[in-house]
Image: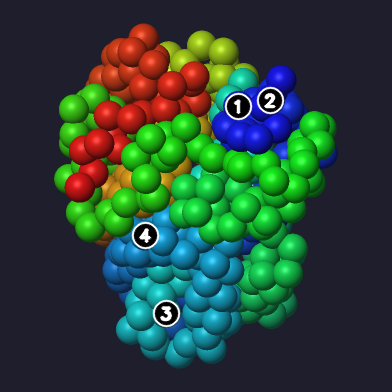
Amino acid sequence: MFNNDRVEISALIDETGLTKFNIGLTVFGFFVMLFDGYDVSSLAFAGPSIIKTWHLANKAVLGPIFSASLFGMMFGATILGWIGDRAGRKIAVAAACLIMGVASMACSMSTELWQLVVLRFVTGLGMGGLAPNMISLVAEYAPKRFRATMVICMYTGITFGGAVVGAIAAGLVAAYGWQVLFFIGGAGPLVMALLVALFMPESIKFLAAHRSGQRRIAALVSRFAKTRFHPGTTFYLVDEAADGPAKRIISPAFLFSKGLVLATLSLWICMAGGLMGYYFLMNWTPILFEQAHVAPSVAALATSIFQIGGTVGGLSLSRLIDRRGVGAIAVLFLAAVPIIGSVGLLTGSKPLLFAGMFLAGFCALGIQFGINAIASIVYPTYCRTYAMGWAFAVGRVGAIVGPVVGGLIVGLDIPIHVIFGVAAFPFVIGLIGSIMLGRAYSTMAASGHLSGGNVEMTSAISCSN
């Protein structure tokens, strides 16, 4: 029950529970992230055709193009994360979709390698900004007992996008060339930018944190709350009310304040290790399968199955994280090492290859979903997107290293089972980070410092000068 004069927004969302509004927002976010996943994966599927069309003798020359988008994502995560915390999640998401759409469309007209490098960097700026803003938006409307579930369900759009580009590559590239992948990857985000501007709500917690007008907040409350409030009701956030309007973040130093340092370091290690392994696999697997004389249609299907496995892995983790915390992430890191290391031994059998790729995706992508959900809980509203942007940016360092190292190893012409063995090593790094993360999460939960719990992270607020 609430005092109709003053209503705390987090308590209202938690008491209201899951509504059609939450589900609709999650579905909307799913389609936004679908095009993010599509554009992330498009170059990997275009790669074999680009090599043939442009008569590239050395496959490793694609390494800088793979890494260009990841460099862009690193900068986009921090820049658009900062914009999301200053100007709003909605503005940042619309800008990210617009950047992605224009740059990807331009990729379809590229005729030189350097053009693809530049345009994939710009595409990466948009891709990097989408995830932290959409995760924050969905998390800030989700009741705490469903927060990880809603974030992960939304984020599965990335894996579906990766599966869609695989299906399109198998059906259209032979007839229309690799350019069709980038054309579709540009048109979709441009449509989504318009839909975001017209229909997507702003985060109610962001509005409250920035004192953006009670009338606007009340209009959003009326869309999901079961209780009706009189026109004079004041809506506020517990973590912002005691400390004034949202503070202006000028450096990431507050991420290492007391109570946050272990969580921040462990999240960054998990992100870097997990993304290093994932992008190694995502960018080079189609080319490695071609090197192993796997039929192109089988390779495309196997890579799509990898994405489907990731979706199943993420959904399997969602309720476990909501109920039991982060232990399941460590289990997936541990399982990923032997599973991914053995994929190169399975190319002689389609059923075994499909099963191996499903399990590899279950672990590699399930890990990413789980880490993203935990990151949405750890940080407070006024700096959540910025903090998550830094976590994604640090993770992109691993993501950049993965394809570059992959290119160097592929260029050595060593057996692919050895290459997949190397691809498993980043998950060992992630396992160490996940053990640290489990300890940090347990400590913060016990002290009431999780934003998904009953007490917001006031220690972080007081240290963010």
Q: In screen coordinates, is 465 left or right of 318?
A: left
Q: Amino acid at mark 4?
A: Trp
Q: Nearer the viewer, residue 294 or 2?
A: 2
> What residue is disc 1 on?
11
Q: Residues within 10 Å of mark 4 (few under 14, many from 20)?
A: many
Alpha carbon distance from label 3 to label 1: 44 Å
Quarter of the rendering containing residue 433: top left
Q: Nearer the viewer, mark 2 or mark 4?
A: 2
Alpha carbon distance from label 1 to label 2: 9 Å
Q: Nearer the viewer, mark 4 or mark 1?
A: 1
> What residue is disc 3 on?
119
Q: Residue at x 35, y 64 (%)?
A: 79
Q: Residue at x 59, y 57 (%)?
A: 213
Q: Nearer the viewer, mark 3 or mark 1?
A: 1
> Which badge, 1 or 2, is on the more N-terminal residue?
2
Q: Give the quarter of the figure containing the N terminus.
A: top right
Secondary structure, mark 3, is: helix
> What residue is disc 4 on?
82
Alpha carbon distance from label 3 to label 2: 52 Å
Instruction: Measuring from the top left, give residue 282's x and y in whole percent.
Output: 46, 50
> Which badge, 4 or 3, is on the more N-terminal residue?
4
Q: Residue at x 43, y 21 (%)?
A: 455
Q: Residue at x 42, y 27 (%)?
A: 456
> What residue is disc 2 on?
2
Can residue 128 be seen here? The reply is no
Can residue 243 be seen here? The reply is yes
Instruction: Measuring from the top left, give residue 140's x and y in whole percent.
Output: 57, 40
